[in-house]
Structures are given as structure tokens and as C-alpha cells.
Image (tube, rainbow, N blue to C red):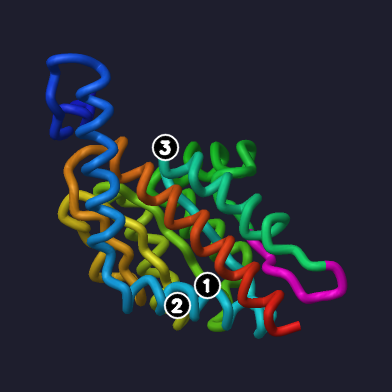
Amino acid sequence: MLKDPRFLNKTFAQESVHQYLSDYAATLQECLKSLAPKALDAAFQLLLKTRTGGGRVFVAGNGGSAAISEHLSCDWQKGVHITGQSCLKVHCLTSNTALLTAIANDYGYDQVFSFQLELAELKAEDLVVLISSSGNSENIVKAATLAQKRQCQIIGLSGFSGGKLASLATVSLHVPFENYGVVEDAHQVIMHVLAQYLDLIVRQRI
């Protein structure tokens, strides 16, 4: 059995749970402020271009990142929908349990996302959003590699050192901290910010 990666987590002051919370929140704020403004704007522009051009968004992640992927799929569709306007078409690659487990069982878990992108006949105008705290999950790296081959734009959300995803992504939104909770919380905030800002900008242009 592989070792649980939680041992990699940096921890905070342990005098009390309130102090732990205070240090955790301060670190999360610092991580969000450290995001490169140009990278965040580039990610937004890709999202806006995909919406305007009628491309599809495919999103994937494992564990907590899978939960963020599911949440993103909701907020980037319903959360930015405007009656009478074109909308984002978001497909979460963790949502179809039957398909996910069939691919894992027959071909290997490392293929669960890239194989789905093959089935979807990924096009160059599509956008692939990949979420991985380590940036090194094999199924995420394979999905990024396939997206590159199909000349798709990739938004990569990573943490820790950024891993392979940070270098494979067209736009890397890297949270440089070694704690899975902090990284995932930051990714969730980024997801919400992009959704809400997209909604605001589109409404201003109507």
C-alpha cells in the first residue's frame, strides 16, 4: 500500500484549535495574494474566449480536487448562466462513476481522464482544466499531455512544488504551499472568483 500523502502537510501552531485556525487562515490569505496577476488574468481570458467561441470545458481532479471539479462544473454553468446568452458547456470527468470505473478496471486508473477526452473527441477550441495539489497525479499528467497533442489550452491548478502539471499547463495557477487543505481551499476560491468575475464582465457587455 502506498503511503498516505498527508504526512507531507505543514502544520500550524498547536496551542489551541483557534490559534491553528488563525495561522491556517493567514497562510491561505498569503497564498491567494501570491498568485501571479498575469496568470489569473490569462486564465480568465481563456475562460471568456471559450465561452464566446462555443468551446467546451473539461475538468478533472482526484480526491478533494475531484470535489472541486464537481463544484466547478456547477458554478461555471448554472453560476454564469444568463437567459438568452450563450453559456459555458462544462463536463466534469469524475461525474460518470460507471464510465470512470470501467476505464480504471479495463485500462488502468492512470487512463481515466485521458480516455474520456479521447471519447469526447477533444477539439482545439476546447479548454481543459486540471486540478492536482501535487501536480504529479499520473492520470492528470496524461490528460494534460493529450490536451497538448490536441492543441488545447490548459488551466492547471496545483500546489506544493507545482509538479509536472505546472509546466504542462498553458496557464499555471500555482499555490506554493505544502498543505493539502490550504491548497484545496485556495483552488476553491480561485474557482469561485473566476466564475463570479466572468458573470460580472459578461453582464456588463450585454
Q: Secondary structure at mark 2?
A: strand
Q: How many marks?
A: 3
- For marks 3 and 2, the one nearer the N-term is 3
**85 in magenta:** yes
> In terms of secondary structure, what is the magenta stretch mainly?
loop
Percent position of residue 58, x then y: 56, 62
Task: Identify the residue position indicated by label 2 in the image.
Answer: 153
Kindly identify the residue that appears in the image at 25 percent across and 17 percent down: 17
**Which circle marks residue 127 in the picture?**
1
Quarter occupied by residue 162 = bottom left
Task: Identify the residue position indicated by label 3 in the image.
Answer: 64
- For marks 3 and 1, the one nearer the N-term is 3
Residue 154 relative to residue 91: left or right: left
- The answer to whether marks 2 and 1 mark residues whose Cβ atoms lie closer than 8 Å is yes
Percent position of residue 115, x then y: 51, 57
Inspect the image, locate mark 3, and give the three-letter code of the amino acid beneath it.
Answer: Gly
Q: Secondary structure at mark 3?
A: helix
Q: CA distance from mark 3 to mark 2?
A: 23 Å
| Span colored in magenta | 83-90
Kindly identify the residue that appears in the image at 55 percent across and 67 percent down: 197
Kindly identify the residue that appears in the image at 56 percent across and 52 percent down: 72
| 21 vs 30: above or below | above
| 156 vs 85: above or below | above
Residue 72 visible somewhere in the drawing: yes
- The answer to whether marks 3 and 2 mark residues whose Cβ atoms lie closer than 8 Å is no
- For marks 2 and 1, the one nearer the N-term is 1
Question: In what quadrant of the picture does the C terminus appear?
Answer: bottom right
Q: CA distance from mark 2 to mark 1?
A: 5 Å
| Mark 2, other Cα within 10 Å: few <14 / some 14–19 / many ≥20 | many
Kindly identify the residue that appears in the image at 75 percent across and 63 percent down: 81
